[in-house]
Amino acid sequence: MASPTGAPAPGALARYDGAVPATVVLVRHGVTPLTEAGALSGGDDVGPSLTTTGRRQAAQAADAVFRIGKDLWPDVPRPDAVVASPMARTQETAAAVSRRIGAPVRTDERFAECTFGEWQGLTPGQVAEHWPGELSRWVREGTYAPPGGESYADLCARVRPALDDVVAAHPTGTSVVVAHAAVIRSLVGAMLEAPPTAWGRIRIPPCSLSILRIWPDGEREVSVVGFPTDV
């Protein structure tokens, strides 16, 4: 994306044809009781809601989103659209962003977190007790699904079309998508053309920001990954 002087922003993908990309800011939700317990919290259940800490994190993330296009990444257009997963924790986080930037929240069920099936709500230790080695397979193989759940590859097949629709709706603006760790990992990994085996190694902290830019010809840039706002 060009700066006000017409030159590419520092460190940006060099484009000299004047093409303007769509920008998508991916925001992970704040913490919930399951996050704090280290348990697997997928798209299988609408809950849980944010904790007190999670609500504070959501407010901090909303403040960071409000600063985009001002003192934070000034070369990026100001965000003017918010899309969220249907889960309680993402809806609550998106509501904080919505209030801060003055844009309504649109819900897209395709951005719901990866489903964990029989692992939902369990800690890694509990999964290991009944399914030895299988949680590691889910993280490392990318195509292995928990019993009754989704693999990273399954997840990406669901969320990638949703991202394409966000881009099509705002082809030269900045949209905010409030989603989940595995969802954001899969989108970042796919944008980098990394195989699903690598996506589990992308760190996405609670209420962090990741930024994707996508041009009309399909060229894309991963500008930011896991930028912390809880500081």
Image (spheres, rainbow, N blue to C red):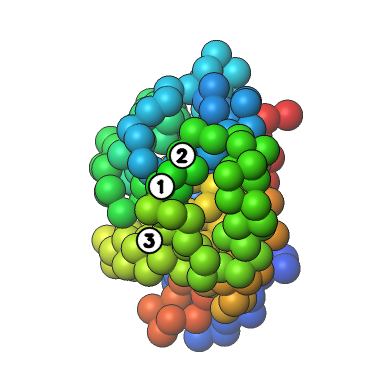
Between the residue at mark 2 and the residue at mark 3, the CA separation in whole angstroms equals 20 Å
Q: Does the residue at mark 2 contact the one at mark 1 (Cβ under 8 Å)?
A: yes
Residue 101 shows in this picture: no
- Residue 96 percent location from the top left of the image: 43, 26
Q: Which residue is mark 3?
A: 159
Residue 215 shows in this picture: yes
Q: Which residue is mark 1?
A: 117
* Quadrant showing the N terminus: bottom right
- Residue 36 percent location from the top left of the image: 62, 25
Find the residue positioned furthest to the front: 130
In the image, 10 versus 110, the foreground residue is 110
Q: Where 214 falls versus 203 (above or below)?
A: below
In the rendered structure, which amino acid carries the disc numbered 3? Val
- Residue 220 percent location from the top left of the image: 52, 75
In the rendered structure, which amino acid carries the disc numbered 1? Gly
Q: Give the label on residue 208, or none.
A: none
